[in-house]
């Protein structure tokens, strides 16, 4: 089997300034999340919180964990874990009637 | 130092990603269990009675910013800037310690208000989930401090950036798990409380 040298240092990482912009964006989204506790938005609350949570999750994974710049193989392993966990526990919660009875 | 691999990818980094993938299942189990038990507080305090959202928001912000300082530590080492690498590593560990301090304060406040580990299924699920997360943050602090010690011994140089990157992956994962916990456990209102 052929072998090759590792490529972990080959990819370009963002600049410090870019990291700070990303952190600022995350801080703004967090502030918006916390604001929902004080400002009542009715039925839109849970979908809004879920969207902001997912956006923050993907920003950290893509930029701070460098999935955007690294080998797709790392993304596949991580996404496999997430998909497996979401599928298994969605079924688990369905069996215990969480969606209908809370 | 580069090593030869069949995939062209670092085995250590790949192992960390596989580990993080498996950790999704661990935290998925703990979050799902919490969701099932969140309404079962019986005579004990309900989530809405005891959660201090402004306080937890500050803790969440501190942990989020520790992810920034961790990438800045990695970035500094990649440039060969040992001084800033140490500074950002120390800042990350301190921010992590502030988060843990906040969690200890929160737990002791809850216990004083009558919410012990065995008070109700809700309390058991809550302390198990947030406690497991706290242990992960604490282990992360230990790993970052060991990086700092290696640095002061002259063993952490530009050649070892991958070690910092791998520990950074673990630290960011702990942060993304808290992003989920903060929203699902603290911010989503409990229907019966």
Image (spheres, rainbow, N blue to C red):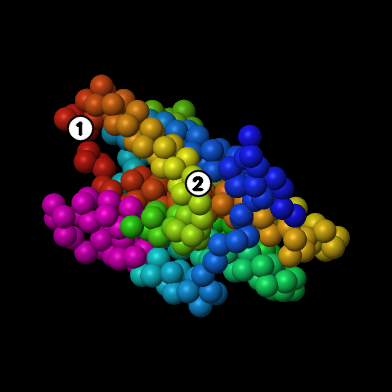
Question: Could you classify mark 1 by the number of other residues whose Cα lies within 10 Å: few (under 14), some (14-19), or many (20 or more)?
Answer: few
Q: Main secondary structure of the magenta part?
A: helix
Residue under mark 1: which chain is it in? A
Please provide percent x and percent y for residue B77.
69, 67
Res. B29 visible in picture: yes
* Image quadrant occupied by the N terminus of chain B: bottom right
Query: Outermost residue toward the left?
Result: A43
Q: Residue at x 49, y 45 (%)?
A: A73
Magenta residues (range): A29-54
Q: Is residue B47 left or right of residue B143?
A: left
**Residue B140 in the image: above or below residue A68:** above
- Tell me, for residue A99, which label it has, or none: 1
Residue under mark 2: which chain is it in? A
Query: Outermost residue toward the top?
Result: A95
Please give the residue where the numbered disc 2 appears in the rendered image: A74
Res. B42 visible in picture: no
Q: Residue at x 36, y 45 (%)?
A: B185
């Amino acid at each position: 089997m052929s072998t090759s040298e590792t490529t972990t240092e080959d990819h370009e990482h963002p600049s410090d300034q870019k990291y700070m912009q990303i952190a600022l964006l995350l801080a703004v989204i967090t502030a918006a999340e916390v604001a929902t506790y004080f400002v009542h938005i009715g039925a839109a609350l849970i979908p809004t919180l879920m969207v902001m949570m997912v956006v923050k999750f993907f920003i950290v994974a893509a930029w701070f964990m460098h999935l955007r710049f690294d080998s797709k193989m790392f993304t596949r392993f991580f996404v496999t874990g997430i998909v497996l966990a979401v599928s298994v526990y969605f079924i688990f919660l369905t069996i215990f009637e969480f969606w209908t009875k809370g | 130092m580069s090593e030869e691999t069949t995939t062209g990818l670092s085995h250590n980094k790949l192992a960390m990603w596989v580990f993080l993938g498996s950790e999704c299942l661990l935290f998925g189990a703990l979050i799902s269990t919490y969701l099932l038990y969140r309404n079962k507080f019986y005579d004990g305090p309900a989530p809405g009675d005891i959660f201090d959202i402004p306080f937890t928001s500050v803790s969440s912000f501190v942990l989020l910013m520790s992810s920034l300082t961790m990438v800045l530590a990695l970035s500094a080492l990649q440039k060969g800037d040992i001084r800033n690498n140490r500074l950002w590593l120390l800042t990350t560990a301190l921010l992590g310690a502030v988060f843990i301090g906040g969690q200890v304060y929160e737990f002791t406040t809850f216990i004083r208000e009558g919410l012990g580990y065995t008070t109700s299924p809700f309390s058991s699920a809550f302390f198990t989930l947030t406690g497991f997360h706290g242990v992960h943050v604490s282990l992360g602090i230990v790993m970052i401090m060991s990086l700092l010690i290696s640095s002061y011994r002259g063993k952490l140089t530009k050649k070892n950036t991958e070690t910092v990157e791998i520990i950074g992956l673990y630290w960011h994962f702990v942060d993304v798990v808290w992003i989920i916990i903060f929203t699902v456990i603290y911010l989503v209102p409990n229907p019966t409380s």
